[in-house]
Amino acid sequence: NAGVTQTPKFRVLKTGQSMTLLCAQDMNHEYMYWYRQDPGMGLRLIHYSVGEGTTAKGEVPDGYNVSRLKKQNFLLGLESAAPSQTSVYFCASMGRGGPKETQYFGPGTRLLVL
Amino acid sequence: AQSVTQLDSHVSVSEGTPVLLRCNYSSSYSPSLFWYVQHPNKGLQLLLKYTSAATLVKGINGFEAEFKKSETSFHLTKPSAHMSDAAEYFCVEGPSGGYNKLIFGAGTRLAVHP
């Protein structure tokens, strides 16, 4: 049981390049989330998904797209990277048990956009 | 809007002394509250959670937190700090809303000195 895994762990991009971050979970969770973490700001929600085939915007969605084609995977895409997207990205997943559920986080992806 | 306030951005203690990390939440109803810990270059790990059962919640590694509705607080404590406790700690409220959104505090960085 690997929990939540993220690929890659670290990436350097040039401005304007594109990339996809992959999140995978093996806990059969319905909900999946992408956050970004910036110094002094906690985690901010980018996009989320409440089930296979559904996605929605969080607090800071601009410049990102997501897809949830399979229940266990949640992809985050950057179509044209900008230096402002330099951050650490965390994926999380959660079951559908309501307020008592816990979100489980992946180890993070460090992205540097030059 | 709901918010979580961590009252100290940095806390420094000596090894073997007590730890107090302060957190206030803003919900007018009884929320679910969590403390997560993040060690350097690692993902977030759940320390403990409050879900309207006992107001004193015990977590991993000797940490505990007390829910005080009258003070809208959920402070994290540990009787005796260990060097391995040095990390960043996040107070989190949720899930709430239609997509079980978590609300993160900005974080408290705990330093433990010999």
Image: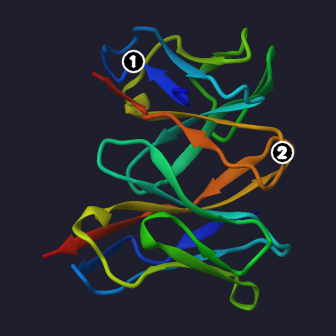
What's the amino acid at mark 2?
Answer: Gly
Which image quarter: residue A23? top right
First in residue order: circle 2 vs circle 1: 1
- Percent x, y of residue A69: 73, 9
- Percent x, y of residue A54: 81, 20
Left-right relation of B103 to B87? right
The quadrant of the rendering that contains the N terminus of chain A is: top right
Q: Is residue A57 above or below residue B69?
A: above
Q: Report, in whole angstroms, how far the alpha carbon at label 2 lies from the one at label 1.
A: 30 Å
What crowding class fits label 1: few (fewer than 14 Cα within 10 Å), some (14-19), or many (20 or more)?
Answer: some
Q: Is residue A85 above or below residue A95?
A: above
Which image quarter: residue A85? top left
- The answer for which chain carries disc 2 is A
- The answer for which chain carries disc 1 is A
- Percent x, y of residue A5: 49, 25
Q: Is residue B14 above or below residue B91?
A: below
What's the amino acid at mark 1?
Answer: Pro
Residue under label 2, please give it.
A97
Residue under label 1, please give it.
A8
Q: Residue at x 82, y 73 (%)?
A: B30
Q: Residue at x 54, y 29 (%)?
A: A4
Label 1: element kind = loop
